[in-house]
Amino acid sequence: MDSGQFDGQPTKIPRHVAIIMDGNGRWAKQRNRPRFYGHRAGVEAVEGVLRACADTGIRVLTLFAFSSENWRRPSQEVQLLMELLASAVSNRLQQIQEQNVCLRIIGDRSRFPEALQAEMAKAEALTAQNDGITLVVAANYGGRWDITQAARQVAAKVEDGQIAVDSITPEVFAAHLSLAGLPEPDLFIRTGGEQRVSNFLLWQLAYTEFYFTDILWPDFNEAAFATAIKTFVRRERRFGQTSEQVESLRRA
């Protein structure tokens, strides 16, 4: 996707950026505050990055808000995270609508309170026709869960005779994953110093460029995001080809 200029130079920016927003708890601990204080600050950091994405021309931003493994955390923290998620969805809905953002929430919602599930559905319906940046929020999401639920859908269609086994291709399978209809992430960012994907978008990250930073998520501002984009711009994405082939295609 040609975005024209970035810092005065012609560039190709990512269409889709996926982020694990890590470091909220450590950020709070550094300030002698409870972990929830860091989670709340993390929600505020989302606004700056979302704005930076829209300004840069990025079409999709996916954020890992709550993983399927996060239920293992202390019950009080989980409860507070549920309240924060509900508050973020309902209280910021008008702002998201005014910014022409299309909100999409992926993950297994069945474990969430019914009121939160209703708020999620309401927010998605209200913003469905917006044609600005798409904000994907992964909540109670896991990459293995995503692949498993897609496999179940495909298997059911095979059983019903809708799909022949020999017709199952990666493209057919991907159409049943949570990000169906959206481009796969071009850039994956993880803040907080850890260097792993933590069961996030396992299928979709196959050819994604990775960027890790020690910056804790609440401190990951627009300048830090710009640095990540500059790093991406300098990389050569070959998708199994040689550098010479990529250069030849670029010149064509």
Image (tube, grey):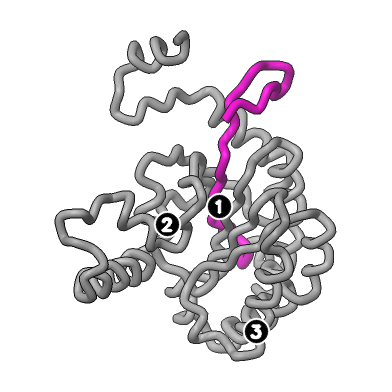
Q: Identify the residue position indicated by label 3 in the image.
A: 118
Q: What residue is shown at x 23% (from left), y 75% (from top)?
A: 160
C-alpha distance separating marks 2 and 1: 10 Å
Q: Give amino acid for label 3.
A: Ala
Classed neighbour count for the residue bearing mark 3: other residues with Cα under 10 Å, few (<14), some (14–19), many (≥20)? few
Q: Is residue 73 left or right of residue 53?
A: left
Q: Neighbour class for label 2 at 10 Å: few (<14), some, many (≥20)? A: many
Question: Magenta stretch containing residue 29, yes or no?
Answer: no
Across and down, in percent, residue 198 comes to 41, 60
Tag 1: amino acid: Ile
Q: In this view, does 77 lie above or below 2?
A: below
| Mark 3 secondary-structure assignment | helix
Q: Give the residue at the far left of this rendering.
A: 166
Q: Quadrant of residue 127?
A: bottom right
The first of marks 2 and 1 along the sequence is: 1
Name the residue beneath numbered marker 2: 201
Report the span colored magenta: 1-26
Lower sequence index among marks 2 and 3:
3
Q: What element carries label 2?
A: loop
Residue 101: image location, x then y, percent: 73, 56
The residue under label 1 is 19
Residue in view at x 65 percent, y 67 percent: 29
Work out which residue is located at the far front of the displayed protein and give it.
Answer: 161
**Alpha-carbon neighbours of circle 1 within 10 Å: few (<14), some, or many (≥20)?**
many
Q: In this view, does 217 lie to the left or right of 88?
A: left
Of residues 96 and 214, the one drawn nearer to the viewer in this rendering: 96
Q: Which of marks 2 and 3 is in front?
A: 3
Q: Which residue is at the front of the view, 184 or 191?
A: 184
The x and y percentages for residue 66 are 54, 70
The quadrant of the picture occupied by the C terminus is top left
